Amino acid sequence: MSTLQSARGRTAALAALITVGTVCGGDAVARSFPFGPHTRSVNDLGNQFVPFHAHLWDLLHGRADGGLLLNWQSGYGTSFLPDLGTYLTSPFSLLVGLFPRDEIDLAVYVITLSKMAAAAAAMTWLLFSLHQGGRWWMAAVLGGSYALCGWSVVEASYNPMWMDGLVAFPLLCLAGEWARTARRPLLGPLIVAVAWIANFYTAYMATIGAALVLAVRLLTADTDARERMRALLRATRTVLLGIALAGPVLIPVFLGSQHAYPGWTRQFSPAGWADVFARTLPATYSFFTPAVFLGSGALVLACTLAFNGAVPRRERWVWTGLAVSVALSLQWGPTHLVWHVFATPNGSPYRQTFVLAGILVIAAWICLSSDWPGRRALLGGGAVVAATALAGATSELVTVWTLLLFAAGFAAVVGGLLLAGRGTCTVLAALLFTGALVGQAAATTAYADRMKLGRLDDYPAWGEPHSERAAAVAKADGWPRYRTDPGRDQITGNDPVLLGGQGGQYYSSHTPDVYTRTLAALGAGWTSNGRSVQSLDNPVADAIFAVGARVRTAPGKHPEVTRAGQVPPLVTVRPPGAEPRYDWNPFRNQERLLGSPVYDNPAGGSCPVGSEVFLWVPDYTGRARLGDSPWVTLRGGQPKRRAALTSLGTVNSPGEKVGYSKDPHRTTLGCLDRAKLTAAVDRLKKTGAVSVEVSDSGVRAELPPGTKGTAVIAATRIAGWTCNGRPAGSHLGLVAVPLDGSTTRVDCSFRPPGLKAGAATGSTGLLGLVLMVLLTGVRKRSRRAPEAADTTSNTNNSQPQKAH
C-alpha cells in the first residue's frame, strides 16, 4: 500500500508539473504577464479579483479599513462577508499574504497556477482510485489534460474563483468513492465543506458531476441493490453534512445575492453544433460556446472507449452514455438551468464544461483499464475524432493553426498508442502523448491570451501609476474623520480596495440594490448594468458622505489631491419633520439628503456667474463643454452604462452656454452656489456628532445634549444594520436613528444577513459529524468484539490437552 501511495504521489506531482510548465510556456509565447509586457488582467480578473485579493492582503496584514463583516473602503461602507465567500474563501487565496503588496498581480497568477496544479494532481489521484490497471504516466498525462482543458485555460484563467470547481470535481468524486466503499466518514464531509466554502457556484456543478460519476460506479459494480442504496445514503449524508458545515459562509452569500442590484438577465440560446465540435480542437476562442478542448490524447481515448472490447461491455456503454448525456445536457434549456442553479448566467452560459471535461478524462482512463486499445478499437475511436474535427472545421472559430495543431497532435497520439500497444518504445510513446498535450495546450493558452486582449476590457498590472495614486491616497488619508476618495479617473472598478481610501466606487456580484439606487438618485454613473457603481465627483455628494479629500489624475500627469476643507462628520443630524422622497432630479435629491438648497435654477439655459455648472444626461454618449472650456466626455446608454452627473466648470461671464458634440435630446443643469454649500456644511457640523468611533463592524457617536430629529450615518442602509438595540431606520437610503432628545449616543452595529442562521447550520453540521464519527467508532468496536472472541475461542480450542 505504501508503495502504491508513493507512486500515486509521484504521478500526481508529475501531472501538476506538466500543467504549470504548459501554462507558463503558453503565457511566455504570448508575452503575457509575468513573462512579457501584455497584461493578463482582463475583464473581472483586473476589475474584481485582483482588487479583492489586495483587500485580503490588507486584512491579513492589519491594514484594511474594516474587517470580515464590514468593508468601509468600498461603496461608502458595505457588507464584506458575501464578497469574501464569493471571491476569497478558497484556501489558495491565503497565498496572497506571502507576496509584497505591489506584486498583487503576480500573487493572483501564482494562486491561479496553484489551483490548476492541484486540479491536475487531484484528478490523477482519482484515476488511480477508480482503476489501478492503467499506465502511471498516462494517469499524469490525463490529469494534466483535465487541468489544461479549454474551459480552464480560456475562461477560468481570468475567473480564478471558478478554478476551485476544477479542483473540487475530482475531490468530490473521491468522496463519492469513499461513501461507496464505506471509508473515511470524517474526511468526505470535510472535503465537501471546503469545496462549497471555496466557491459554492462551481462546487454545486462539481457535486452534480460527482453524483453522476458515483451513479455510474454503482451501476457497473458487482453489488446488490441493498448495498447500492446504502452507498447512496452514505453519499447523501456526506454531502448534507459538508454543506451544513459550510453554512456560515453559504447563507450570507446567498442572502447577499438576494439583496444585490439585479443586473441583467439573459435567455439561454444553445450554440451551433459546428461551434461546439470546434471547441474540442486546440487554439479556438469563444465566450459563448463550451470549451471542451482536452488535447488529442484524452479525446482519442475517450472516443475509443465504446469500441474497446478489452473493457467489459457494461462499463464501456455506461461511461460512454454518461459522457454523451452530459454533453447533450449542455445544449438543452431545462438541463442548462439545472447546471446553473436555475438561472442563466450573465456571462458564459457553459460554466459547467469542466465537469464534462472531467468525465471525458475518466472515460479515457477506463479505456486503458484492461489493456491498450487494439487497432480495431483505435480505428473506431479515431474515426469519431476525425468526424468531430471535420464537423468543427466548418466553424468560423477554426483557423489554419487550429487544424495544423490538431493534425500534429492526433498523429502523435495515434503513433504513441500503436507503440505502447506493442509493448515496445514505451518511453517514446510517453513522450509523444506528453508532447501532444503540452504543445496543443500551450498553443491554446497563448492563443486565448491574445484573443482576450482584443475582445475584453483590460487593466494594467501594478506599476508606477498605481504606486503614485496609492501614495497620494495614503498621504491624504484621515479616516474616520473624513473619507479619502481615490478618484473618478479609475484604474479598476474597485480602486478603493486596490489603491486605498474610502470611496464610493464598488463592483461586485453583491453590489446592494439600495446602494445602486441611492447613488443613482444622487446622479452617480455606473457600468455592468448597475453592478459597478462609479465614484460621484461632486462637492454636494462629498459633503453628504464626508469625503474630505479626493485624488484627481489627469492623463499623463501625476495625481493631485483636492481637499474639501471642512466636511461634516460621519454622523450628522436632520431636524424633525416628515422624511422627503427622491424624484427624478438628482440636484433636488442631493439637496433633500443634504438638508439645504444649494443649487440655483439656470435662467434662460445658463447659470449665474461664479456658480459651478453640473450636467446630468445619463443616457448621453458624447462630449459637452461650457463655453470655450475643454470638452468633457460622457458615456451613457442605459441599462448597461449610465453617465454620471458631471462638472463642466465655473461660469466666468454672463450667458455662457453648454455646447454638445451631438444632440443630447434632453439635459438637466444644476448651478452650484459654493457659498450656500459652505453654509449647509457648517450647519451639519454644528449639529452633528461631537465624536465618532468606527470599528470593524459598526459606528458609535456622541451627539450634543438634547438633540432631536434623525441621526444620519454617511453609509447606505444595507440589510444588517441595527442601531441602539433595534433595526436601523432609513433616511433617503442612508442609515438613520430617530432621536427624541433623551439620548446622546448612537451605537450602530452591522451583522450580515444570514450570519446567525449560518452559524446555527454550521454548528448543527459539526454536531452531526461528531455523532457520526462516534457511532462509526462504536460500530467498529462492536464488530471487533465477536471477532476477538472467536479468535480467543479458536486459540483455546487449539491448545493441546493435558495428560491425566
Image: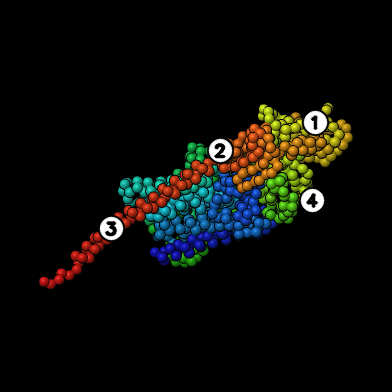
Between disc 1 and disc 2, the foreground one is: 1
Which residue position is annotated with label 2? 258
Mark with earlier residue (3, 4): 4
Between disc 4 and disc 1, the foreground one is: 1
Between disc 3 and disc 2, the foreground one is: 3
Left or right, residue 167 beside residue 666? left
Which quarter of the rendering shows the N terminus?
Answer: bottom left
Mark with earlier residue (3, 2): 2
The quadrant in which residue 133 appears is bottom left
Q: Distance between the residues labelled 4 and 1?
A: 34 Å
Which residue is painted at 75% across and 36% down in the image?
683
Which residue position is annotated with label 4? 557
Q: In the image, which disc is placed on residue 600?
A: 1
Which residue position is annotated with label 3? 785
Q: In terms of secondary structure, where does tag 3 sit? A: helix
Q: Distance between the residues labelled 1 and 3?
A: 91 Å
- Residue 25 seen in the current view: yes
What kind of residue is marked 1?
Asp
Q: How far apart are marks 3 and 2 (CA)?
A: 54 Å
What kind of residue is marked 4?
Lys
Which quarter of the rendering shows the C terminus?
Answer: bottom left
Mark with earlier residue (1, 2): 2
Mark with earlier residue (1, 3): 1
What kind of residue is marked 3?
Ala
Mark with earlier residue (4, 1): 4
Height in image: 71 above or below 120?
above
Q: Which of these two is toward me, 760 or 683? A: 683
Which residue is painted at 67% across and 29% down in the image?
579
